[in-house]
Amino acid sequence: MEFLQPATWSEALAMKAAKPEAVPIAGGTDLMVEINLDHRRPATIIDLTHIKELTEWGMDDGRLRIGAGVTYARIIDELGDRLPGLAMASRTVGSPQIRNRGTVGGNLGTASPAGDAHPPLLATEAIVELASTKGTRQVAANEFFAGPKKNAMRADELIAAFLVEPARGPQQFSKVGTRNAMVIAVCSLALAVDPKRKHVGIGIGSAGPTPIRAAEAETFIQEVLEEHRLWERHVHCEPSALKQFGELVAAAAKPIDDVRGTADYRRHALAVLARRTFRWAWDDYRKSK
Amino acid sequence: MKPRLAEETTSGGRVGDRVRRPDAVQKVRGDFPYSSDLQVDGMLWGATVRSPHPYARIESIDTKAAKAAPGVKAVLTFEDVAGENAYGLEIADQPVLASDVVRYWGEAVALVAAEHPEQARRAADKVKVEYAVLKPVTDPEQALLPKAPKLHPGGNVTRHIKIRHGDQNATAEVVVTGDYEIGMQDQAPLGPESGLAIPDGEGGVDLYIATQWLHIDQKQLAHVLGLEPHEVRLTMAGIGGAFGAREDLSMQAHACMLALKTGRPVKISYSRPESFVGHVHRHPGKLHYEHGATKDGKLVYVKARIVLDGGAYASSSTAVIANASCFAVGPYQCPNATIDGIVAYTNNPPCGAMRGFGSVQNCYAHEAQMDKLAAALTMDPVALRRHNSLETGSALITGQVIDGPVPVAELLRLVHERPLPAPAAKNADLTAMPGGVSNTTHGESVKRGIGYAAGFKNIGYSEGFNDFSTARVRLSVVDGKPRVEVHTAGAEVGQGLVTIQAQIAGTELGVRDVMVLTADTEVGSAGSSSASRQTYITGGAVKAACEAVRERVVALAQSELKSGEGLRLEDENIVGADGNVLVALATLLGEEVIDELRVFRPRKTSPLDPDTGQANAHMQFAFAAHRAVVDVDTELGLVKVVELATAQDVGKAINPQAVEGQLEGGAAQGLGLAVMEEIQVQDGVIKNPSFTDYLLPTILDMPPVRMDILELGDPNSPYGLKGVGEPPTISSGPAILAAIRAATGRPVTRVPVRPHDLVL
Amino acid sequence: MNVSCTVNGRAQVAEGVWEGESLLYMLREHLGLYGSKNACEQGECGSCSVYLGGTLVCACLVLAGQAQGKEIITVEGLARGHGLHAVQDAFVEAGAVQCGFCTPGLVVATHDLLQRIPSPSDAQIREALAGNICRCTGYAKIIDAVNLAAGRSRS
């Protein structure tokens, strides 16, 4: 096993270009489990924790650009007001020790359908910035997840950052687990309300081979809100519409039975979470006026 | 050559005091050497090759490539087992290394020792084992069918207990039936199986190990290693919890074999996934019950068929099924009973002892039945239980009449009358909600439920088993002060045995400076730290040895002081009949060392009659009751246990702080089985062998435990004490289930309760 | 490879480290600091909690090489001299220690909590310690210990 520790981003990209099979490590919360439990023996590991720019965030043309190495703990502490949905999701990631170390970049790199950061990134239409020695490119979160633990990255690329607009309206995140802390999602849902665009974004996790954006449910609820002028009237939508919304979210899922839960339960729970999170978000929206 | 072991510190305190644990100081500093921390120069690391199949014939094993791998010093197979390749606590049915057939997923097949653990793991990968895969038997009911393949020469029935008590044709006015299912729980002690074997250069071996019973390990090791017991010496290393998981051999024989082969010290330390296949689990089971009662709520009969899955090897299955059967009715009077308790061999992971063994499984069933019966009678469930509670002088369904305090009705009254926690607050902190910080409810669909349960089990060994412990107590003068050294082989698994031994010696000899020596096989057996027995049995042995020392001190004083009767040893002085100090103990002793060894035996028990299960099979009984208050998100099926209340008779609290710790910790393990803990086995394969998917209760899952600790005094035991450790794990979970049923209105007959059980 | 770092205030070099070793393994087997425990080695139990560069982490999830040049504080480094740190003393006194395998991790995590929040609420204690599994105590006496340590630090 070879351990590489680049000091700069360009050095890291050069190393990845020279050894495309090399595995990057940041917080280690995924890779180290695989190494410790003898599931994986990468030939080369590139440590990204010494690269300063990965740990930085700032505004970039109206969007927040957040380095791939920013930890969950910092997202909660430093970005909780601007990215409440992602911060809520971050609060459910593992334990304080994990949140101190784990990064959204790492979550994206592993691309597990259960990654807690993914539903909020989908709901807020975040963009993933990938880099190689050949340059950078941007991939919409919705396009980024390619299959179970597969993403759109090329072998020579590293994740530089993700870009997301600061919240303009209420956001929610909700995750079902069979323990009251430190649990991998049985299923999860993120919802982002954007009054300016009159848009409702929904991402679901642990309910299919990839994290999924519930596009039909988004369209449906937006139509309901338009049709009944709810954005302007600041009232709740009809329970029947909410019920249908929940069913559409559930229908977007492609869950399986596994040790964490059954497919039927996941669909059921997603419908419940959809109704509840929308209510909470809409309550906040109504109160904000 | 010896690894560094825990310091033998002195402590004081008397029976009944809240005593600071002497070992806690090293533990909080991170300086307490657990078995996985042992290290000596020149040490090799062992790794184990395990079966990837639950059931297969071994066609061949090729170790050539492994032997040639870097750093490798030895590769061993069944051919290297010098003694008989069979061990087991009750039945020697398990090979040290599989030879012709593997019977469960993860069974040990070969061993490697290498300079670095990674070298050992890589070499283990290179051991080529060819298997002819067989269809595993994974359902105990299927295993019992005549057509099932025989997994062991004697067939697949490990033990069948028949209890035939009273009228076998009794009928009743009100009858309720139910089927219940218990999932497979893991003890999950945090310290992994680990130890260090050091060859003595003369064919023998010293093993530093975390085990619940040094001498049973020694006996089994001598047998499989082909050595005399004195050639296999065991010393206790720090134990990171046990709960039944360290009763059977895990890596003990393997490390010894590798050490004897290489002539070098060998350490084996399991990873967490390996630990899941490296020890036995709590038996999963299916229980069918029928309760008959009179219209005014008196139990007339109970019929039950209890089938436990013993997995591939017997371990302590025979004792587990005996408990499940003997206590099948719960702590209630029942004149007629027909119980069939069967434990079967399958190709599932082997099951054995875990805290409360046998009684945990049946308590879920008998308590659900009592609630069902109460509903059928439109009676209050607590009133029904109290109406039928065992009392002093009651006969169990095994015919045994219980003497001493039997405060079942009182325990139920105490938990019932305890004030209830406040209702769920509106806008409560997320951590107080079902689902916790995962933000699944802000109060929507949350319903509160309250449930009650009572349970009991035996303390110590049963069925005529030779229960005893040995203690050596040595009194001398060190630095001008009296010093007592207590030496037993009792396993300090975390329960506080070291503290209790020191308290007893301090009480009996009035000496402040008591040192409990490292447990090892140099002293006689203490029996296991299981069945809640050590405070009673090893405590009894320490007490007896101290009394013998005291008698000699008094005799010495009589002879030195030329004094007659009435001398006492009190507060490090010899005191006359008038209470005046005559001489300081240290002065009296001078250079003299008083050393006494005693063996303590509790009351004898008898084997169960094979046809009727009738006997005085048990030595002592312990009782507890629980009330659970839960909030259930009835739409998502998520549960928050809000509060547990318990009442337990501990006879005498030797160390009240430790007793509270047992009641709280035991309840947490009960909560775990009730709502989250399950080893999921599919076609014989464990699907969740890690702490990512085998979920243990966190600090956010465990509610406060409100306690009533009764000290009613057992007339037969030292200081009147009763075993404490297991009852908290027995009725806590069933109370939670009752509360969940109350909140949801659903029958809920399986544990652990899964969200989909509550909503789909 | 060799890894240089500062552990409990002392400059240390771990020699002959295999690249796949965790910081936990390095602390234990190269530097002889066995206080951080190996209960799960997947970040699920907190028994190996240490400070890395002042931040509470699971040492099992840090690749040994990632500790190069960093400052590490383990449970062995909390107390000054031969005494106990207030958190350690509170754990002993409150009866928060049974088998003790989780204790070093809990002591470090509690130390971190009380540095951030000197008087934590029950909910804050529970959320902060949710990553530290204890199998023995049922946590009640751990909460007592945290409150005891917090109270003593205030006074």
Image: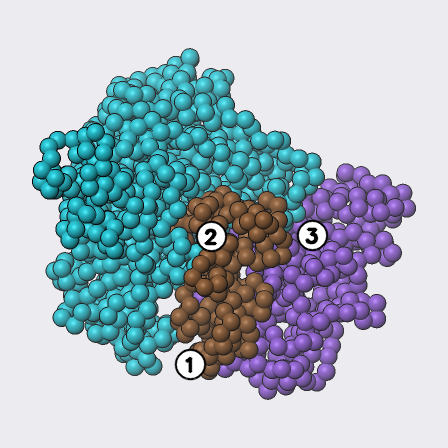
Q: Is residue A9 visible?
A: yes
Left of B262 or right of it: where is A221?
right
- Figure check: B115 above or below A206: below
Read off the chain for label 1.
C
- Figure check: C142 above or below B64: above
Q: Are marks 3 and 1 on the same chain?
A: no
Q: Residue at x 57, y 47 (%)?
A: C151
Q: Is residue A147 visible?
A: no
Tag 2, which secondary structure? helix
Q: CA distance from mark 1 to mark 2?
A: 37 Å
A106 or B205: nearer the eye?
Answer: B205
- Judging by colour alone, the chain drawn in purple in this rendered image is A
Q: Position of residue A16 (x, y in %)?
A: 61, 82
> What is the three-letter code of the residue carrying label 2?
Asp
Q: Position of residue A198 (x, y in %)?
A: 85, 54
- Judging by colour alone, the chain drawn in brown in this rendered image is C
Which numbered disc flags the more N-terminal residue, 1 or 2? Answer: 1
Near mark 2 (Cα within 10 A), the count class, few <14, some 14-19 or many ≥20, is: many
Q: Quadrant of residue B272?
A: bottom left
Which of the two marks, 3 or 1, is nearer to us in this view?
Answer: 1
Q: Quadrant of residue B94?
A: bottom left
Residue that extends furthest to the top in the rendered view of this protein? B296
Q: Residue at x 23, y 37 (%)?
A: B581
Q: Residue at x 44, y 56 (%)?
A: B28
The colour assigned to chain B within the rendered structure: cyan
Residue contact at pointers 3 and 1, CB within 8 angstroms: no
Residue pointed to by mark 3: A173
Near mark 1 (Cα within 10 A), the count class, few <14, some 14-19 or many ≥20, is: few
Residue pointed to by mark 2: C89
> What is the three-letter code of the residue carrying label 3?
Phe
Q: Residue at x 74, y 65 (%)?
A: A126
